[in-house]
Amino acid sequence: MLFLTWEKAVSMLKGDAAAINMVGSERMRSFKIALLAERYAEGVEQDSGAKIRAKAAFDEEMAVFEDVLFGLRDGSQQYNLKKQDSPEIINKLNQNIDKWNKTIKPMLQNIVSVPTGKELTKALKG
């Protein structure tokens, strides 16, 4: 999905080790976000403490993912990323940002906002 487009952008980042490393970190972070979303859904069934911890970790990873995503394009002192000046790289990163904002981020946020298990049963009963 998002990382297929990034492969082309990464190949254009030759010589920019910080950006290449951060793209790799983003890939790992995306797997972690998916795992945290799953833990959240499982935590709903177990106890509210597990749910709260999973949601907090999920929100934190989502925020870092988004900071790095925009930092790859716009530069980021925090992550030692240079602002991109190549129109081709900027275009690829804009495609990724658009895909993130319109598809992936809303889908992930939906996972942790839709009631499941006992909460869903309670909501349906009114």
Image: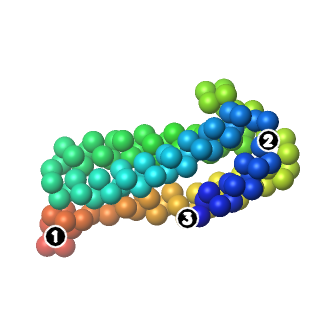
Q: Can I make out residue 51 in this image?
A: yes
Position of the N terminus, as image quadrant, is bottom right
Label 3 packing within 10 angstroms: few (<14), some (14-19), many (20+):
few
Who comes first in sequence, dot 3 or dot 2? 2
For the residue marked with disc 3, what is the amino acid? Thr
Q: Residue at x 50, y 46 (%)?
A: 28
Q: Residue at x 37, y 61 (%)?
A: 111
Instruction: Name the side, left or right, on which 80 lies relative to 115.
Output: right
Q: CA distance from mark 1 to mark 2?
A: 53 Å
Q: Residue at x 24, y 49 (%)?
A: 51
Position of the C terminus, as image quadrant, is bottom left
The image's mark for residue 103 is: 3
The part of the image, by quadrant, that contains residue 53 is: top left
Residue 79, given in percent of the width and then of the height, sits at 62, 30
* Vertical side of 64 occupied by 115: above or below: below
Q: Which residue is mark 2?
A: 14
Label 2 packing within 10 angstroms: few (<14), some (14-19), many (20+):
few
Instruction: Name the side, left or right, on which 27 lies relative to 71.
Output: left
What colouring method underlies this structural image? rainbow
Q: Residue at x 46, y 52 (%)?
A: 31
Q: Which of these two is toward me, 38 or 122?
A: 38
Who comes first in sequence, dot 3 or dot 1? 3
Q: CA distance from mark 3 to mark 2?
A: 29 Å
Q: Secondary structure at mark 2?
A: loop
Who comes first in sequence, dot 1 or dot 2? 2
Q: Secondary structure at mark 3?
A: helix
Q: Can I make out residue 123 in this image?
A: no
* Vertical side of 81 occupied by 97: above or below: below
For the residue marked with disc 1, what is the amino acid? Thr
Q: Which of these two is toward me, 15 or 97?
A: 15
Q: Which residue is mark 1?
A: 121
